[in-house]
Image (cartoon, grey):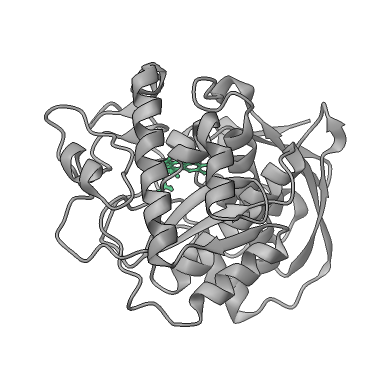
Amino acid sequence: MSTSSDWPSRPAPDDVAGRLRWYADVARWAPSKHNSQPWRFVVDGGELEVWADPSRALPDTDRQGRELVLACGCALHLLCVAVRAAGRRPRVEVLPQGHSGPLARVVEGGPWPTSDQDRALLAAVPRRRTDRGPLDATPLPPDLPFRLQDAAQDEGAVLRLVSTPGELASLARLVEQADRLLLRSGTVDRELERWHQHPGDGRQDGVPVTSSRGQAASARADLVQRDFTVPGAVAAHDRPGRDQPLVAVLCTPADRPADWLAAGRALAAVLLLATTSGANASYADQPVEAEQLRGQLQEQLALPGPPQLVLRLGVGGQVDAPPRRDLDEVLFSR
Ligand SMILES: Cc1cc2nc3c(=O)[nH]c(=O)nc-3n(C[C@H](O)[C@H](O)[C@H](O)COP(=O)(O)O)c2cc1C
């Protein structure tokens, strides 16, 4: 089973080929819907390409492949974090061959003066957690929301905070409505079943059936949570505690693959920064996934562009990291 590899305690190798491998080793810890890990990294000389892996698509809930590209954007951001931590400036070309080739090509630029913050962000990669239990934003630094917004903006996205009681109520209604719509379609459960990871099954992808707060508590949450439990599974994210997360919607200027990639890079930047302040995160994406409601979400919250993700952030509990596929399953050479 692939556990957190030793790269956080192992310096980046001296040779370029070793470093490209090290970067991909970091990048594979990106979040992805259902932990589908829909990426491939290809080394071509001194370049590292990030490719989407269509065999890991989720066509029932992600018809366009939007969330697939978004997950690859997260991996791309982690890759850049690793490059900077190794003292190099990442040079990134997005969609270098339009829509037919890799999503991005990364090369090492000149030297980069690695800062304590760069090291902290790298150290946050294995500590970042999706936590579907109660999350409390009240102990977080008061300036964190603004720093998160800056981090998203640096990657070409907007993190719109949802803070007034009226907006939170509108969002909660839309999440609940979308959750019911998606469940009623039947396809969501079928799709989810294929990505269930059961205790001891040894699979290196998918979502552990224990990693939610359980069916009843998920449905009762202010923003209805997606539930991954199966009968008999222990809900590992269920615990008492104040559920008062920072809620935000990640938006982009438009809704094309380049925007989805930017949203993914912004998501990873936001999550890593939040992790350095002790926060966990989870998602309430149902109204973005239910195509009938995505426009309403944008309209009701007066969002500055198409919504890509709905996030909850706050101090959570100790939750395990789902495993990742081995590096050799996702890294190839040309
Ligand atoms: C684009 C995207 C969409 C996601 N949507 C949901 C979601 O709707 N509900 C949920 O509980 N988790 C969602 N997740 C979180 C994944 O399930 C999680 O990243 C994955 O299981 C790996 O776990 P980790 O983030 O703890 O490493 C999403 C992640 C991404 C990147």
**Measured along the vertical axis of the image, is residue 264 above or below residue 215?**
below
* Residue at 52% in and 24% down: 58
Q: Is residue 15 visible?
A: yes
User: What is the quadrant of the C terminus in the image?
Assistant: top right
Q: Nearer the viewer, residue 272 or 143?
A: 143
Ligand 1 shown in quarter: top left
Q: Is residue 13 visible?
A: no
What percent of the width, then of the height, locates residue 191?
41, 21
**Measured along the vertical axis of the image, is residue 19 above or below residue 87?**
above
* Residue at 71% in and 60% down: 155
What percent of the width, then of the height, locates residue 201?
28, 26
Horizontal relation, residue 287 to residue 262: left or right: left
What percent of the width, then of the height, locates residue 175?
39, 42
Toward the left, the furthest residue is: 232
* Residue at 18% in and 45% down: 217
Q: Quadrant of residue 103?
A: top right
User: What is the quadrant of the N terminus in the image?
Assistant: top left
Q: Nearer the viewer, residue 11 or 68?
A: 68
Q: Quadrant of residue 72?
A: top right
Horizontal relation, residue 24 to residue 190: left or right: right
Q: Quadrant of residue 112?
A: bottom right
Horizontal relation, residue 281 to residue 59: left or right: left
Q: Nearer the viewer, residue 70 or 307?
A: 307
What percent of the width, then of the height, locates residue 67?
58, 36
